[in-house]
Image (cartoon, helix red, strand yellow):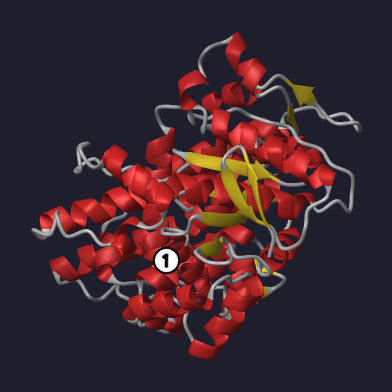
Amino acid sequence: MPRIVIDGVEIDFPYQPYDCQLEYMTKVLLSLNQGKHAILESPTGTGKTLCLLCASLAWLDKQIRPAELISTIDTKHQSGLGNCLTCDDIGNHDDNKLFRQIHFTNLNKVNNACKIIFASRTHSQLAQAINALKGTVYSNNISVVGSRDQLCLLTEVMSLDSNSAKIYACRMRVQTKTCEYFRNFDSKRDDILANLKLEGIVDIEDLSNFGQKTRCCPYFISRELKTDSRLIFMPYNYLLDSRIRTLYNINLENTAVIFDEAHNIEQVCEDASSVTLSSALLASAIEHVRCVCEVIFNHNIESIETETGDNNHVNSNNNKRKPTVIMNKKELFDMTQPEESAIESLSIEKMITLKGQLIELERLIDELSVPSEGLTKDGSFIFDLLGRAGINHWTNNAIQTIIDEIMSFTNSADSNYHYIVYFSFDFVVSLNDCFMCKPIMFLGEGVGKVYNFGTI
C-alpha cells in the first residue's frame, strides 16, 4: 500500500493516488491544520470520499500520537516506573524526538485527542463510505450511529407508525426492563463491545446481524461504541437537529466534522428547524387527557367511599365505568386497574387545566380563516396563538411535566392504552419544538428572523 507524505502527514493510500486526489487531500489537510472551514469539490468518480477519509484519519493519527505517548509516560510515573520507558513505548525516531520534547512537561495534563465525525445524507451513502474504508489500514476504532428504525429488533415496536411512538415504546421497555435484547446487552456490555472492537468496522447491517445472532440490542450497542471511537459515521440530521444531538449525547467539542455530499444540507437544516402541530394531533391529546381525567375522578370517588365505609355505591368490576376511545369502532383501551402509586401522583385540577388549555388552542386554530392556498404568518404568530391559550415560555415546562406524569401513569395501565399515548408524546415533541429557542422567543422582531414563517 503506497505511503505518501503531505505537509508532514504520512497517508497510507490503497493505491497510487492521481494528481487530483493529491491536490484534494492537500486541501483537506490545510483545513484541518489551520482549524478552518472548507468547501471542497471534486468531479464524480475521482474517489473524493476515500481521499477525505484517508487524509483526515492520517492527520488524526498524528494528533493522537502525542496524547498516547504522554498517557504512557503518565502511567509509568504513577506506577513508579517513570525511568523505565522502553523503545516500544517511545516508538520510532520521530516519536523519540517528540518524547524528548514532552518529557519535562506537566505529565498530569494529558491531551484530549480529537475525533472525526463523517456525516452523509443517508445510511446507504454511509454504508458505501464504510465499505471503501474497509480496504485501508484505517479500518479500526470506527463506529456508526443508527436509529431505532434501522436497529430495533422488536416487531411490536417496529410496527408502530411514527418515530415518536417507537422512541416512547423503546424507552418504556428499557425503563421497565421488559426488552430481552436490552437486558442481554446490559448484562454483558463489556464483552460485547470488546468483541466488536476486535472485528473492526461495523455498519448498520453488521450491527443488526450481530444483534440477531447474540440477541443483544444493536441500537444501544451503536450508542455505546461511539463513546471511544475516533471516527463516527452518522446521517446529517443527527448533527443538525439539536434534539437528536442531545438524545445521542453528541459532543462537537474538539471534533472535526465532515459533511459528504453536502449539496442538500440547506434543506436538512430547514427540516430540522420545522415544527408540525396538526389538528388531529391536538384532538388526540385532548381525548387522551379527557380519559385520564375520568379515570382519576372514578378513582377518587372510590377512595372516598372506601374511607367512609360507604360501599353501597361501589359498582362491581363488571359494571364499573370504563373510559374508552372509539376509533374505527374499536375500543382501544381499558384502564380499570392502574397501579395506585402512578394514579396517586396525578392531580385532577392540573388535568382539567391542561384539558382547558388544549381545547382553547383547538378553538383558536379552528377560528382561523385559511384560504385554499394556505395561510402564512411571521414566526411570532405561533407564540401569540399559544399564549392566548395559556401556553407560553413560563407554562411550557409545567405542561410537559404533567404530560410526562400521564405517560408514567400509562406505563402501569393496560398495554392497549399505550396506543393513544403515542399521540400525546408527539404533541409533547411538537410543543417543545415551538419553544426550543427560549432565550429569543420574546425578542420581538428577532423572533421573526429566526422563525421566518409558520404555515397553517
Residue 1 position by quadrant: bottom right
- The location of residue 48, given as percent across then percent down, is 78, 49
Residue 452 position by quadrant: top right
User: Hey, what amino acid is under mark 1?
Assistant: Thr
The residue nearer to you, when weighing 329 against 128, is 128
Mark 1 surroundings: few (<14), some (14-19) or many (≥20) residues within 10 A: many
For the point 20% across and 37% down, which residue is it? 106
Mark 1, secondary structure of its residue: helix
**Can residue 418 be seen by looking at this rendering?**
yes
Image position of 383 (left or right of 379): left
**Can residue 301 be seen by looking at this rendering?**
no
Which corner quadrant holds the C terminus? Answer: top right
For the point 49% across and 64% down, which residue is it? 141
Image position of 373 (left or right of 416): right
Image position of 354 (left or right of 18): left
The residue nearer to you, when weighing 161 against 223, is 223
Q: Is residue 45 above or below residue 159?
A: above
Most extreme residue toward the left, as rendered?
80
The residue nearer to you, when weighing 285 against 14, is 14
For the point 31% across and 61% down, which residue is it? 87
What residue is disc 1 on?
410
